[in-house]
Amino acid sequence: MFYPQLTNAKDLLQQYDRGYRDFRRSKLQSIDLSECCLSGIDLTRSELNDSNLAHANLQGANLTEAVFVKAMLWRVDLRQARLTGSRGDRAMLIRANLSRATCDRAVLHRADLRLADLEFTDLSQTDLSGANLSYANLTGANLAGANLSYANLTGANLTNANLSRTQLDRAIVANICWEGSIVDDLDSSRVSWQDRANRDSAQIVTSFPQQVHGE
């Protein structure tokens, strides 16, 4: 059942507790939903700019084309959530759990994703330019066609990640685990390699192995 365009946290939580899940196009800027359980909620095309969702449970939520610019999402649970086409420029996603989430074509320009769990997350064609992904877990993530220009990947785990056609211009690359990852069409001269071992461990090929595609 659709509940029309809520604008405050109190009304949303009351309706959620009554069983409503469809809150598409809600205008929820600068509200506090920290530590709230909102699993399975539909916030498609909703506005959450500057809102506080720290420690919130949004597992399986639908945030397709939602806007959460500069939102606080520290330790938020977004496992298996849908964020296709969403926008979260400069969002704070430190230690957020987005494992197996669908984030294709999202804009996360300059987002803070330090220590975030992005295992098997679909980040294809996502704009992560200038994002901080230090020590993030990107095991098995799909970054095909993503923009990681000027991103900080220090200490990130990219085991079995798909970086086909990924833009890494001026990205900071140091102490990364590349095991099983394949990068094609990469101009290594434009990457800020912090040590030779990282540069030499990246596999520069033209296609992705079948077992990774089928993951």
Image: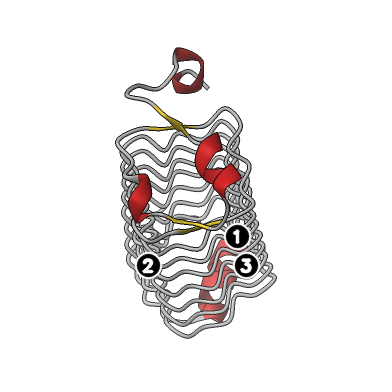
Q: Residue at x 60, y 75 (%)?
A: 33
Q: For residue 38, which numbered disc appears in the image? A: 1
Q: Residue at x 38, y 61 (%)?
A: 170
Closer to the chain start, of discs 3 and 1, is: 1
Judge from the rendering whether residue 37 lies leftward or rightward of residue 202; answer left or right.
right
Task: Look at the picture and state if 13 lies above or below 99.
Answer: below
Closer to the chain start, of discs 1 and 2, is: 1
As rendered, which of 139 and 8 lies closer to the eye? 139
* Mark 3 residue type: Ile
Closer to the chain start, of discs 3 and 2, is: 3
The mark tally for this picture is 3
Residue 164 place in picture, x, y as percent: 36, 34
* Mark 2 residue type: His
Q: Residue at x 45, y 43 (%)?
A: 102
Q: Which residue is mark 3?
A: 94
Q: For residue 68, which numbered disc appears in the image? A: none
Judge from the rendering whether residue 7 lies leftward or rightward of residue 32; answer left or right.
left
Residue 8 place in picture, x, y as percent: 48, 82
* Mark 1 residue type: Leu
Q: Say which quarter of the image contains residue 148.
A: bottom left
| Secondary structure beneath label 3 | loop
As rendered, which of 35 and 16 lies closer to the eye? 35
Q: Distance between the Cα atoms at labels 3 and 1? A: 19 Å
Q: Residue furthest bottom?
A: 30
Task: Look at the picture and state if 119 lies above or below 170.
Answer: above
Q: Distance between the Cα atoms at labels 3 and 2? A: 14 Å
| Secondary structure beneath label 1 | loop
Q: Residue at x 57, y 27 (%)?
A: 180
Q: For residue 109, which numbered disc appears in the image? A: 2
